[in-house]
Image (cartoon, coloured by chain):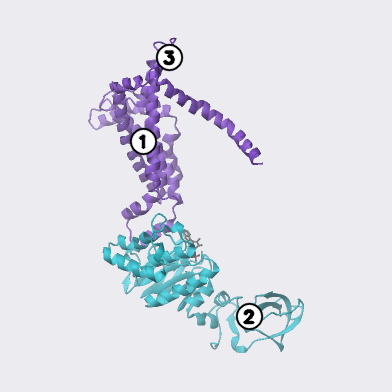
Amino acid sequence: MLKVEGVSRIFGDKKVVDDLNFAVEDGEFVALLGPSGCGKSTSLKMIAGLEDPNTGTIELDGKDITHLGPGQRKLGMVFQSYALFPHLSVKENILFGLKARKVQKDEQQKRLTSVVDLVGLGEHLEKKPGQLSGGQCQRVALARAIVSEANLCLMDEPLSNLDAKLRNEMRTEIRALQQRLGMSVIYVTHDQVEAMSMADKIVLMNDGRIEQIGLPEDLYNRPATVFAAQFIGSPPMNIIPAGDKLLGVRPEHIRIEDGGMPGRVISCDYHGADTIVLADISSNGDTESLVKLRYPGHALFTAEQNISIHWKPEFEHQFSSSTRTSIDAQPTN
Amino acid sequence: MIRRLNLKAWLLLLPALTLLVAFTHWPTLKTFWRSATWAKSDVAPSQFVGLENYELLIEDPVFWQVIQNNFWYAVGTVPTSIALAIGMALWVNGKIRHKGLLRLAYFTPTILPMITVANIWLFFYSPDIGLFDQLLRAVGIDGPNWLGDPDMALGSLMAMTIWKEAGFFMIFYLAALQTLSPELYDAAKVEGAGPWRTFWRITFPLLMPTTLFVLINALLNAFKLVDHLFILTKGGPNNASNLLLYYIYETAFSFLDSYYAATLTVVMLVALALIALAQMLFFDRKIHYR
Ligand SMILES: Nc1ncnc2c1ncn2[C@@H]1O[C@H](COP(=O)(O)OP(=O)(O)O)[C@@H](O)[C@H]1O
Ligand SMILES: [Mg+2]
């Protein structure tokens, strides 16, 4: 339904978004993932019409909307700061767009009732945003974005101002809401866990460019670049130089087993369910070569202890050291 | 302990309190008292006359003219300068270059001393040789006598006030506008609101606290204006541009009738207090304070 082709945005002499190409299908939840400052918000704003692209086209439902005003694109949008109108009641906030678009009164009421039901704001309709908690503000912003019944909803880091517990709840809730309404969503986040757990498809960005587009499991199992390999997963994938190649292996795929590669423990980080062990696997005299590995349970290694590590060949990824892109012969599973 | 703290607090308050009582509260009380007394001459002892001075006031046509002038002066200058201030602030706050310079330009009228301002405008308004008359002559119009014509004098005064106050108020609006989040405007745009709706539904209500502050100040200024009159019209011709405070000054220091001046002052104090009170009561409920 949404097609972004060759879209770029230049601020001053910096290409903040460089040749963006991706599509969103009907009812698809697409996460726009990347580190802070990589151009996610700028990309989203161009789709919303709040920024003008320097090049490229944006198509919505087969119509070219590249230079259409934001109000005419019929999108919903949730902002990072919620952007609720502080002087208007919850109800007026939600109805703002319908009133601006001169939707009939009884239709307004009908839609208000149904979204308020959906996001659960029943008893707060007459309150001002200042009287609500962060999570409730989030719901109002969500309600305002979906009440227009737009097919595409844009969300810019909508959960980043919430505490961890609420963030987890809202994550599930937003995903459920999206599936129930069959909306398409573009969801901007810098949090790979959020993207992995919510999205049908992830568009991974770095420094204004797309690194990889794919299913969450594609990004995890078949990272196209060293950047993608290290951005997804926590702790990030270990990258070990090996001749003209780089070997990549995830900490959770490394086992401590006899008869493997010798290593020396540097430190242990206990996380409850598991322990992250930092080890040096350089052979004597070489420069340090550190890897992290995930050891189930509470590991009781002492510093300088010698261990032996091992991973299955199918968990090994190979990257070219010059292009830093994947040269895996075969997709691993 | 608490006592000691209290004592300390009172001691700290003392200098300010002394000044306030000595130069504001005490003279106010004395003015009220004086407005109820009268003396034949400066040396004669004053005697209590009750409301006689106020009866005098009601029969004084100049008083009514001055009140009327003040009313029109307020009506003519306050809304206009506020509207201009908002308009200019929106414009300056928009995407234009040299914001700093422009802000300074608008602020200049306010940082200039009133007497200087009045003198500049005296030159603008001078008959024949003044700037306005010269400009009008250039397009073939015989300019009026801006300050000498009873029908023009108050209007000319109002024009100058608007010029001076709009720039001053703009600074407050500009400061207020810069605290508004740009994301609010993005949200309004996405929701399909045009500039008109955005202004009336978002910007204007969010500027309300500033508007209240500015409104009180503007109204109080309108009743307190006096310095321009010294330079420009001296309340003339024939009281056409006379305002309450200037009339009080004239009564006290030209006509040397301090008892009647006290009576006029009481009227002014009551008027100012009422303005402040009405605004607090009326607006406090309707304004969204963050
Ligand atoms: N209006 C602007 N003018 C100049 N630079 C900007 C503007 N908006 C964003 N940038 C720059 O563009 C880059 C990408 O910003 P943004 O899209 O907000 O990143 P993200 O949302 O991924 O954190 C940043 O380096 C930011 O400083
Ligand atoms: Mg951002």
Query: For the image shown, how many numbered marks are present on the structure?
Result: 3
Mark number for residue B46? 3
| Residue A274 drawn at (x, y percent) | 65, 79
Which three-letter amino acid code belongs to the residue tagged 3? Ser
Instruction: Please report the residue visible at 64 percent of the width from the left and 38 percent of the height from the top.
Output: B3
Which three-letter amino acid code belongs to the residue tagged 1? Trp
Disc 1 marks which residue?
A: B163
The answer to the question of whether label 3 and label 1 lie on touching residues, with beta carbons closer than 8 A, is no
Rendering quarter of residue B135: top left
Instruction: Please report the residue visible at 44 percent of the width from the left and 75 percent of the height from the top.
Output: A175
The colour of chain A is: cyan
What separation in Å lies between label 3 and label 2 (alpha carbons)? 100 Å
Q: Secondary structure at mark 1?
A: helix
Cβ of mark 3 under 8 A from ligand 1: no
Instruction: Please report the residue visible at 34 percent of the width from the left and 43 percent of the height from the top.
Output: B83
Q: Secondary structure at mark 2?
A: helix
